Amino acid sequence: MSNITTVNGERLWQTLQIMSGFGAIAKDGVCRLALSEEDRLARDCLKNWALGAGCRVRVDRMGNMFLRREGTRPELPAVVTGSHMDSQPNGGRFDGVYGVLAGLEALRTLNDTHIQTERAIEVINWTNEEGARFAPAMIASGVFAGVFDLQFGHSRRDQNGVTLLEALRQIGYEGEHPVGGFPIHAAFELHIEQGPILEAENRQIGIVTAAQGQRWFEAEIVGFSAHAGTTPMDKRRDALLGFARMVEEVNRIGRTFMPDGRATVGMAQISPNSRNVVPGRVFFSIEFRHPDETVLEQMECLLREAINIVNNGELEAVVKRIFDYPPVKFDQSCIASIRDAVKALGYSHRDMVSGAGHDACYLNESAPTAMIFIPCVDGISHNEDENIHPHWATAGANVLINALLDKAGRVNAA
Ligand code: HGY
Ligand code: MN
Ligand code: MN
C-alpha cells in the first residue's frame, strides 16, 4: 500500500461526543434503544452530517441507512463499511456508533483530500444490532443477508408488544428501498474490541479473522402463583425456584467449556413480580457462544437435559432456540487489505477472533467481509464505563479509510 491517507481525528472525536448526547445517561453512558426517540435523533443527526458531506442517503424497509459517496463508476458494486447506533439500556458511548462515525469521517476525509474512487463507498447504520429491544440481535443485517425474511424482521415485538415495523413508522424510518438483494464488492466493520486483549498487549489494532458462533434461547417456567403467607413451603410450585436452578445449570454449562465457552442468562421477567406472591411464571433468555459449532451443539444438549430436570410435574419448563449463527470466518482478501493498511501505517496489531457478534457476521454471508478492532479501556463494554482513547479512535479510522481505498480503487492521487 503506497500512498496512505489519514483522517481528521479531532473531527471524529467531536462527532462521537455530539452523538453520545442522544440518549445520554449517568456515568457517561447511553441508552439509545433501537428505533426509540433517542435513536431517531441520532439518525437525523447522522443524515444531516451525511448530506452535508455531499452523500446521498437512502433507507431500506428495515430502517437500515446507507450514506453513499459516489464513485466514478456507479454501475460497479460498492465498497461498504458501517455498524450500528442502537445501544444496550446501559450502553457505552462507542459500541457500534464508533464504526458508523469513523465511516463518515472517512468520507469527509476523501472530500477534504479530493480523492476520487472508482467504486462508490457506502457507510451503513444497521437497525437493531443489539437485540436489546427486539430479539434476535443483528436482525436487520440478518434480513439484508437473507438469513431472516422481511416479515419476520418486521414482526419482532419489544417487551411492550410494539412491533419493529410499528417502531420504524413511529420514528419515520420505514424506508421504501428493498432490504438487500444487491451485490457488495467488499465490506469492513470497525468496532471497539469489547474485551481486554488489545489493551493488555499494548496493541493498536485487532485484525479480526473470525467470530465465535452464538445460540440464543427463550425459556419459560410455569408453576402456580400463591399467597406468600398462607402457602406452606411443601405446597408451593415456585417458578422462581426452577429459574434459579436453570441459572445455576446455564452457568455450569458455560464453565464446562472454558476458556472459550460463554453462557449467559441476561433477561428475566417474573410474574406477577409481587413481593407477597409466590412467582407463578418466569420468562427468560439464555445465550451460548463458542468458536466451535460442535461445542455449541453440546451446550444445547446439556441445556435441554437441564430443562427436563426442572420439568418435573410440579413445574412446566420449555425452552426454544430463537437464533443461531455458526462461527464465522471472514474474507481473506478483505483481511489482507486491513493487514496492508496496518503495516503501511506502522501500527502494532494482532489477529483476533471476535467474542461479540456484529452485523459484519451476517454481512459476511452475502459479501466479502472483515473487521477491524481498536482497544477499549479494561475491555469494558455493555456498561456505562465503556471508554476508548482518542488516539485509538484515530488509528482505527486510519486503517479503515486505507482498507476502503484499497478495495474501492483510487482514481486520482490526492
Ligand atoms: O451481543 C453481542 O455480541 C453484540 O455486542 N451485540
Ligand atoms: Mn456493537
Ligand atoms: Mn453491543
Image (cartoon, rainbow, N blue to C red):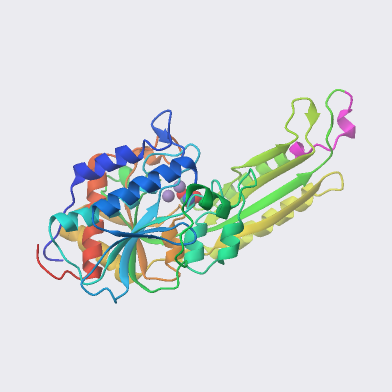
Residue 409 in picture, x, y percent from top left:
20, 71
Residue located farthest toward the left when viewing the structure as drawn: 413
- Residue 332 against residue 269 in the figure, above or below: below
Quarter of the image containing the C terminus? bottom left
Quarter of the image containing the N terminus? bottom left
Residue 393 in picture, x, y percent from top left:
26, 46
Residue located farthest toward the top when viewing the structure as drawn: 229
Name the residue: 29% across, 76% down. Answer: 76
Residue 239 part of the magenta segment: yes
Name the residue: 90% across, 33% down. Answer: 235
Point out the stretch of residues depicted in magenta: 230-242
Residue 174 in picture, x, y percent from top left:
49, 56
Location of residue 153 (image quadrant): bottom right
Location of residue 210 (image quadrant): bottom left
Residue 413, visible in the rendered structure: yes
Residue 365 in picture, x, y percent from top left:
45, 69
Name the residue: 43% across, 36% down. Answer: 23
